[in-house]
Amino acid sequence: MVASTGSTEREGWSSRSAFILAAIGAAVGLGNVWRFPTLAGENGGGAFVLFYVGCVFLLGLPLVLAEIFIGRTGQDDAVGSIRKVAQRSGASGSWSGFGVIGVLAAFLILSFYSVVAGWVLYYVGVMGGDFLGAVFSGEPFRGALAGESREMIQGRMGNLFADPMLLLTMHLVFMGATLFIVARGIGSGIEAAATILMPMFFVLLVGITVYGAFVGEMGGAIAFLFTPDFGKLTPQAMNEALGQALFSLSLGVAGLITYGSYIKGPAPLGPTAVTIAIADTSVALIAGLMIFPIVLAVGLDPAAGPTLVFQTLPFAFQTMPGGALIGLLFFILILVAAITSSISLLEVPVAWGIGEMGWSRRTSSLVFGGGAFVIGVACLLGYNVWSDVRPLGFWPLFADTDILDTVDGFTGKVMLPLVAFFTAVFVGWKADRRLVEEMTGLSGFWLSVWRALIAWLCPLAVGVILVTGLFPQVL
Ligand code: PHE
C-alpha cells in the first residue's frame, strides 16, 4: 500500500496492457450488455446502431484520448490532474472545476449502478438455484425455470422491486464487493480484478453468442441490428445515441483521467484510445448478437425496453435447450461486466479523497463507497416505500421521474455532457500544444484530425446533446 500523503510514490499499473484491460473493464458494463441492446431495440435497430457507432468514433474516441492525456500528464487525481495540465499550459487553475463535477457524477452514478447490479445479482441467485435444481433432478440441460408460467417469471421483477430488504441486501453485497476491491488499491485490487474478470467475461460473451447462433435466430438478429431504416432515426433517438456513447465509453466522469493518471512511463496514447473504443463498441454489438437471436427465436419483442434482460430473456431461456445453464451464465456475465465498471466509478472519488483531502485509501473508500451506498438506498426505496417521491419534481423534465431515474437522468443528461464539453474545450483550446503532442505521441495527419474533432466537433455536438437533452421541446 502507498501512503496517503503523496510523499511516497503514487500507485501505478504494472504495464500498458494492464491499463488497457482495466480501462476496457471500466468501459464495458451494464451500458453495453443491458442499456445498449435496450436502446437499439426501442429505437428500431439498424439506423440507431449505425449512428451510435459514428458517435463513438467521431466524438467518443477523441474524448477518450483527451481524458487519458490529462491523467497521464497530471499524474494526480482528476481535479489535481486538470490543475497540473492547466498550470503547465499557462491556463487558469479554475479549469479543474469541471473535474469536480466529474468526480461528483462518478459518485452519483455509482449509487444507482450498484442498485441495478444488485438486480443482476438477484437473478444470478434465481438462475443459480434453478440450475442446481436441474442438476439434482438429473436434467442439467433442461430449460430455465421449468414449470413456471410466463406471469410467474415476469412477475419476479415486480416482486423484487416491491421488497426493499431484498433490494437493499443485493445492493449492499455488490457495493461491498466494489469497496473491497478498490480499498486494496490499483495493483492488487483493480488491476487484479480486471486481469481475472475480463478474460472470463470474453469467454462467456463468445460462448453464449455461439450458443445463440445455434439455437436462436441469428439471421433475424443481424438483420434487425444492421439493416438501417433511417425513418426510425428520430432526433430523440440521435440524442439517446450520443448520450449512450458517452456513458458506454465512461466519459464525462473523469474516469479515464483517473485511470490514465496511473500510467507510468511512455505510452502511445492514440492506439491505446483506439483499442478501448473498438473493444467497447464490439462488446456492445456482440451483446446485441447474443441477446436478440434468443429473443427473436421465442417470438418475443425486441423493443421491450429496460425489462428486456430481466423479464424477456428469462422467459426465453425457459424454452431453450440448456436454458437453465445458459441463463445462469448470462447473468454471471452481466455481473462481471458491472463490477469492473463499478470499481472504476468508485476509484474516481476515492482518488480525489486521497489526492485532494489527504485521506488514506481506506478512509476514502469507506467515505465514498458508504456515501454512494446510502444514496443507492434512497434510489431503491423509490421503487416501493418512496415511490411517490420526485426529487426534481419542480423541473418539467424530471416531473414524473422516480429517485433512481432522476439520478440517472440528471447525471446522464446534465453532468456527463457538461464535463465532456469542458474536457473538449480545455484540451482543444487551452492545453499547451507541445505538451499535447509530446504526451499523446500523436503527430502529422492523425494529430490534425484529432485536434479538429476535439476543438470543433466535440464541443459542438456535445453542446447539442446538452441543450436538446435539457430542452426536449426544441427537437
Ligand atoms: N461505461 C460503463 C458501462 O457501460 C458505465 C460507466 C460510466 C463506468 C462511467 C464508469 C464511468 O456500463
Image (tube, helix red, strand yellow):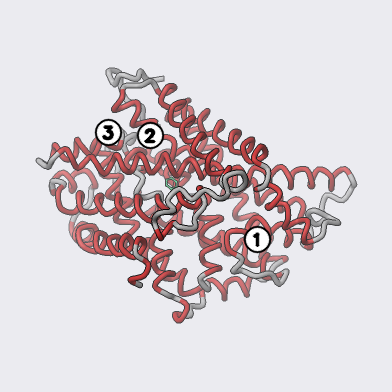
Q: Identify the residue at horizontal 71%, vertical 42% (top origin).
A: 125
> Along the horizontal axis of the image, is 389 left or right of 247?
right
The residue to which callout 3 is attached is 75
* Quarter assignment of residue 286: bottom right
Residue 387, position as x, y percentages in the image: 58, 49
Left or right: residue 154 versus residue 117 is right
Real-space CA distance between mark 2 and mark 3, rounded to the nearest whole angstrom: 15 Å
The numbered mark at residue 349 is 2
The structure residue drawn at horizontal position 12% and vertical position 42%, both measured from the top left corner, is: 91
Q: Amino acid at mark 1?
A: Val
Mark 2 touches mark 3? (CB < 8 Å): no
| Circle 1 or circle 2, nearest the eye | 2
Asked where in the image residue 254 lies, by quadrant, the reply is top left
Q: How far, Cα to Cα, is label 1 from label 2?
A: 39 Å
Residue nearest the observer in this picture, 138 or 162: 162
Q: Residue 402: x, y in percent?
A: 52, 52
**Helix or strand or loop: what does disc 3 sit on?**
loop
Residue 116 visible, this angle:
no
